[in-house]
Image (cartoon, grey):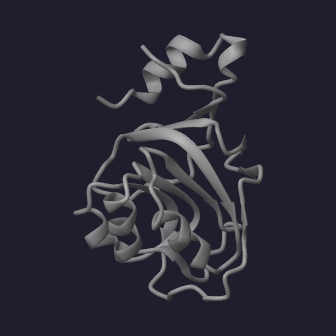
Amino acid sequence: MALLTTDLCDAYADEPGAQLRAMNPMLIGYGGRARFGGPVTTLKLFEDNVRVRELLSAPGDGGVLVVDGGGSMRCALLGDRLAELGRENGWSGAIIYGCVRDSAELAQIDFGVQALNTHPLKSQKKGLGERDVSVTFAGVTIQSGDWLYADEDGVVVASRELTL
């Protein structure tokens, strides 16, 4: 059962050890799994999704891939094939600070996806990008090893796993 972001905020907002941060409401849900969460792996890249494919091809162990795509609105960093790959490899979802494509198909895949918007153009394929670096967008800094929880009401990040 997925934890609700509203309940997490109510329970942990005043607990310093949780370091709970709520992202500014700028992401749109596209995946077939509206509620998802898990330990974070970060990627920082720009208009190039080769590293996204590399990570989603590896075992995800229920984790969430957080991609800082620089907020680019010029191409998509994730589509239906990569979402299906992530689902098959045990990732719970992806947060994309950039665009996705194949939105109708994404809605049918049991994989969480939140992104800025859609764009039909595919990304470059140069293999550039950094893994496990701190990324900052939507008013929050996120590191690999943080825990992220997403649902219809938003996205929250904590320094550790949270329970209710």
The single residue placed furthest to the front in the displayed view is: 59
How far from the left and from the top, in percent, is residue 127? 67, 82
Q: Residue at x 37, y 68 (%)?
A: 85
Q: Is residue 33 left or right of residue 146?
A: left
How many labels sit on residues? 0
Q: Quadrant of residue 23?
A: top right
Residue 73 position (above or below residue 33): below
Q: Residue at x 48, y 62 (%)?
A: 58
How far from the left and from the top, in percent, is residue 68? 67, 61
Residue 118 position (above or below residue 134): below
How far from the left and from the top, in percent, is residue 117? 50, 67
Q: Is residue 14 left or right of residue 106?
A: right
Q: Residue at x 61, y 50 (%)?
A: 41
Residue 130 position (above or below residue 132): below
Residue 38 position (above or below residue 64): above
**Which residue occupies the foreground of this view, 114 or 59?**
59
Q: Quadrant of residue 125?
A: bottom right
Q: Quadrant of the N terminus?
A: top left
**Which residue occupies the foreground of this view, 82 or 74?**
82
The single residue placed furthest to the left in the displayed view is: 108
Q: Quadrant of the C terminus?
A: top left
